[in-house]
Image (cartoon, helix red, strand yellow):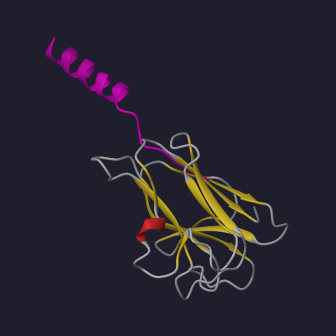
Amino acid sequence: MMFKSVVLALLATAIGAQAERHVVHFDNRCGFGTPTLIQAGRVLSTGGDYVSNGPLIGAIAYLQTGNCGFNGDRCTLIETTLKNPTSPGAGSSTDISLIAPHTFSVTSGFGYFNGCDGAGADCNNANCPTAFHQPSDTFVQVACQVNDVNLAITFCL
C-alpha cells in the first residue's frame, strides 16, 4: 500500500510539473546573410527555430553577412535571456546592442510571442533610440514576466 502511495505521488508530481520551454524564431527578410544564435561560445542555430527546454541565458543573435565576428562584432546584436520568472522582475529580458565593437549592419528587431505579445523593439539606423549605445542605456531592455515566452527576431523589417 505504501509503494502504491509513493508511485501515485510521483506520478502526480510528474503530471503537475510542466517543463520550461522557449522558442527563438528567425525571420530573415534580407535575401542574404545567415541568422546566427550563440550562447557561451556555442552556435545554437543558423536560421532554424531553436527550442530551449529550460532557461536560455545570455544568448546573442545577429545576421551573419560575412562582416560579423563570431560574437557579432561589427554587426547589430540582439541579446536575450528567456526564463520563467521566479520572482517579480526576474523573467525574460531582450535588447538590441550597438555598443562597440557592435555597429549597425542591417535593420533588426525582436518581439515576444506566446506572452507579452506586442512587446519588442526595432532598430533601423545607427542612431536608433531603441538600442544600447552605451552600457548605461538600460532603459532599452524589454522585459517579459510570462512563463514559456518565445522570441521572434526579424532582419530587414
Give the image location of residue 59, x and y in percent.
Answer: 50, 66
User: Does the magenta segment cover residue 8?
Assistant: yes
Q: Which residues are magenta?
A: 1-24
**Which of 45 and 32 lies nearest the eye of the viewer?**
32
**Which of 118 and 2 lies nearest the eye of the viewer?**
118
User: Can you see residue 154?
Assistant: yes
In the figure, 17 relative to 82: above or below?
above
Give the image location of residue 66, x and y in percent.
Answer: 74, 83
**Which of 75 and 138 lies nearest the eye of the viewer?**
138
Q: Say which residue appears at 20% left-offset and 22% top-offset.
A: 6
Q: Is residue 25 found left or right of 18 in the rendered image? A: right
User: Does the magenta segment cover residue 92?
Assistant: no
Pick the quarter of the image with the N terminus: top left
Q: Say which residue appears at 41% left-offset and 51% top-offset.
A: 83
Pick the quarter of the image with the C terminus: bottom right
In the figure, 102 relative to 109: above or below?
below
Q: Say which residue appears at 55% left-offset and 50% top-offset.
A: 119
Q: Is residue 78 found left or right of 6 in the rendered image? A: right
Give the image location of residue 77, x and y in percent.
Answer: 59, 73
**Which quadrant of the structure image shows residue 110?**
bottom right
In the displayed image of the protein, which residue is found farthest to the top?
A: 1
Give the image location of residue 147, x and y in percent.
Answer: 42, 41
Q: Main secondary structure of the magenta part?
A: helix
**Which quadrant of the structure image shows residue 2?**
top left
